[in-house]
Image: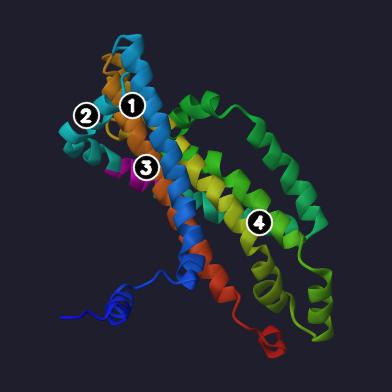
Amino acid sequence: MAVDVNSTAGRLERTVTPVHPASWRLYGPAIRRVALPLAFVICVFAAWEVAVRISGVSSMIIVPPSAIFAVLSQHHAILMQHAIPTLAETVAGFSLASLLGITLGTLIASSERMRQAIYPNMVLFQVIPKVALAPLFIVWLGIGTPSRLAFAVFIAFFPVAVSTAAGLAGTSPAALRLCRSLTATGLQTFVNVRFPYAVPYIFAGLKVGVTMSVIGIVVGEFVTAQAGLGYIIMFASSAAETALALAAVFLLCLVGVILYGVVTLLEIAVMRKLDAPMSAGDVV
């Protein structure tokens, strides 16, 4: 019985779904953004594992990544129990720092006098060594959550304030002239023109601020807490449990990356909303 090679090949071609170039153009950049950092981290962990095993360094000094992941697997319940208060306090501290930073940035950009009054003092507070003030926060606010939140706000508000002020001050002069020609009020100009122009700057400051909030909370936990990942790090270090300490550090990194990702997703959503067409009537 003769077989029609051409018809068979045609059926095979119809059953195979080719990868459309448009799909790769759409999802390719996102895949590369995830794949490249992930591949780099895997290479670092692999080199770390090999270096520790070859060198024979004591486990009290450094442990391979496999030991860290073993601790994460064995003690995940306890570690997650301590991660929850750290995450909650970080979110609270970051929220307060964001509110304070955006408010101060708006005041700085509102007039030259406000800038001269607020900005130099804010810079003065920023150059003070933060860790040196941690004991004073305990004296002022006591041992507990308030002192840790205040310390996180103290660390994280500055980049948000500076970025907000820079964004509001950098509004397009042409857009401001258009608002004046349309007799828009100061509030209308701020809501519909100046603030949208400043949004990318604000989110740049928020991304820095969220990572600083993690640092602030952990430093506070080093000194005052009886729970949290910072407490685990201090406890494990004092007991020479290097693997447990590094497991807590790994979870802290994960918390920071997750919060950074949440801020990034919020930025994307807000920017898409602001990119919607706006008519002159929306200004006035």
Residue furthest to the front in view is 1
Residue 154 lies in what quarter of the image?
Answer: top right
Find the magenta span and give its range: 84-90
Which three-letter amino acid code belongs to the residue tagged 3? Leu
Q: Main secondary structure of the magenta part?
A: helix
Residue 237 in the magenta stretch? The answer is: no
Q: State the mark number for residue 246.
A: 1
Residue at 36 percent of width and 31 percent of height: 249
Question: Which numbered marker is on residue 71?
Answer: 2
Tell me the residue that label 4 is attached to: 164
Callout 3 touching callout 4 (CB < 8 Å): no
Pick the front one: 50 or 190: 50
Q: Is residue 75 left or right of residue 218?
A: left
Looking at the rendered image, the disc whose residue lies closer to the viewer, 4 or 1, is 1
Kind of residue sitting beneath label 1: Leu
Query: The disc labelled 2 sits on which kind of residue?
Result: Val
Q: Is residue 85 magenta?
A: yes
- The image quadrant of residue 167 is bottom right
**Quarter residue 77 falls in:** top left
Above or below, 26 relative to 4: above
SS category of the residue bearing label 3: helix
> Relative to 192, is 254 on the left or the right?
left
